[in-house]
Image (cartoon, rainbow, N blue to C red):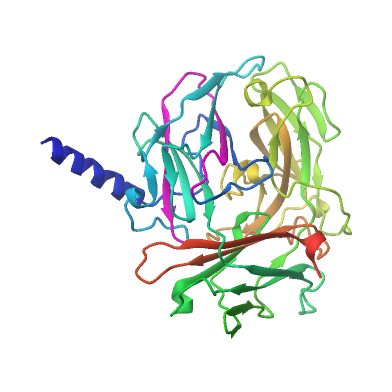
Amino acid sequence: MKHLAICIALVLVCSYSRAEVQLDKNYSPSIAGVKLFSGSQFSYPIMNVGATNALELHFDDMDGIVKSYSYTFVLCDADWQPADMSPFDYIKGFLTNRISQYRASSIATTRYMHYIAYLPERNSVPVKSGNYILKVFLNGDTSKLAFTRRFLVVDNVVPVGVQILQPFDITKARTSQKIQFTLDKKQLNIFNTPQQLKVAVLQNFRWDNAITGMQPMFMRGDLYEYNGERDFLFPAGKEFRWADLRSFRFQSDRVENATLNTQPFEVWLKPDADRTRLGYLYYEDYNGFFEVNSTENINPWWQGDYARVHFTYVPAGNQPLPGKDIYVVGQMNNYELNDSSKLTYNAEKGVYERSLFLKQAYYSYIYVTKDIGAKDAVPSMDYTEGNYWETENTYTVLVYYRAMGDRYDQLVGMVTLNSRLNRR
C-alpha cells in the first residue's frame, strides 16, 4: 500500500505539471507586488543552467497572516506548453520547496505579509535549459495556485549576431524597427530545421507582442540568416510614460491629488494625453519595468505602503475611440488585457479611467488598444502613443533547439541589444 501511494503521488505530480496553466498570472486575490528578477529589478529573470540563488522573488499577501507557501518549476517547450516530461527529468533534488522567509509589514498603514525567496535553492535546481514556469501555491497543494511567473534557463552555445535596422519598407520606415540576425548552428545536430530550430524575438521582454515562428531566409553552411524584408518588424512606440510613487506623502510632479486618510490611500495621477500627434522626444525610461523603491528612509519591501492609483487617459477631442478598448499596461500587470487593466470611458468628463492597486514604487507604463471583441489581437499603440523609429527599445533574440528524440526545447542561444546603442 505504501508503494502504491507513492506511485499515485508521482502520477499526480507529473500529470499536473502538464496541465494547462495561464502564464504570469495572479490566481489569489490576496497576492500583490510580485517581483521576480535577476540581479536588478530592471532585469528579466534569466539564469544559466545549474546556477543557484540566481533569481530573487518577492511578493506580498494582503491578508496579513502567515501562510504556508511552496513553489515548483515546470519546464515548457518554445511555445510555453508544458513539456511531456516528468519533473524528475529536469529538476535535481526536491520537486517542491517551502518559502520560509517572510516578514510582517511595519510602518506601512496597509497590513500585509512579505515573502522572499532566492531561486533556485541548492536542493531544487533545474538541470535543463529552456522556458520555465514558476508556480507558487498554498499548503503543499499544487492545485491551490497563488501565482505563476515565467523565467528562462539558458545554455549559451549558439553564437548570435544581431542588428537593429530601420525598415526597408518606406511605409514602416518612420514607425517601426527591424531586427535581423545570424546564428551559427555548428554546435547543433540539425536534420530538420523547421522542427528542430525555433527562434523568438522580444521587445522590452514582452511576450504579448513577441514574434515567433519565422524560418531563416538563407542557409550558408553552418550560418542561418534571418533577414527577411518583412520579418521581425516591431512598431517602435514611444518612450514609456512614468509615475513616481516612491512616496505617497512627498508627492512627485506626476501626482495631481492624494487622500491619505483612507485605507488604502487614494492617489490620482495627472491625466495622460493622447501622444499620437506629438513628435518624438527622448528621455530615459524603464521600458515597462517597475522598481519597488522609496525616497524615504525605509525598506520598501516590507515597509512600503499601498494605494489605489487612478489613471486617466484623455483621447483626442475627448471623444471615445470607435470600436476600440483601451488598456493601461506594463510589468505592473504583466501586460494583461483584461477587465482589471481596461479603461472605462467617462462621457461626462470625456476621458477614460482605471484604478490599480499598487505598491510604493517607480512605474513605467503605456496605453494600448485592441478591437472590441477581438480575443487574440496583438495590442496596438497606434491610437494612443504613436510610433517613431527613433524610440529606445530593448530587443532579445532567443534560440531554441530540439535534439532528435527529445521531448523539450533547449534554450541554446540568447542575446539582448538596445536600439539606441546598437542600431544601424
Which image quarter: residue 340?
A: top right
Closest to the observer, 356 or 392: 392
The quadrant of the picture occupied by the C terminus is bottom right
- Magenta-drawn segment: 50-77
Look at the image and tell me whether residue 377 can be seen. no
Which image quarter: residue 174?
A: bottom right
Closest to the observer, 420 or 273: 420
> Residue at horizontal 76%, vertical 75%?
167
Work out which residue is located at the far left of the displayed protein and give it: 1
Which image quarter: residue 175?
A: bottom right
Closest to the observer, 212 or 346: 212
Task: Tell me if 26 is positioned left or right of 17 in this view.
Answer: right
The quadrant of the picture occupied by the N terminus is top left
Task: Tell me if 219 is positioned left or right of 420 in this view.
Answer: left
Q: Is residue 191 above or below residue 62?
A: below
Residue 35 rendering spot, x and y as whole percentages:
60, 37
Closest to the observer, 29 or 281: 281
Query: Is residue 71 on the magenta stretch?
Result: yes
Q: Is residue 159 above or below residue 290?
A: below
Query: Is residue 216 on the magenta stretch?
Result: no
Residue 36 rendering spot, x and y as whole percentages:
58, 40
Q: Is residue 209 above or below residue 343?
A: below
Numbered circles on residues, count: 0
Look at the image and tell me whether residue 396 can be seen. yes
Residue 217 rendering spot, x and y as whole percentages:
61, 82
Q: Is residue 138 above or below residue 364?
A: above
> Residue at horizontal 77%, vertical 53%?
319
> Residue at horizontal 54%, vertical 38%?
53
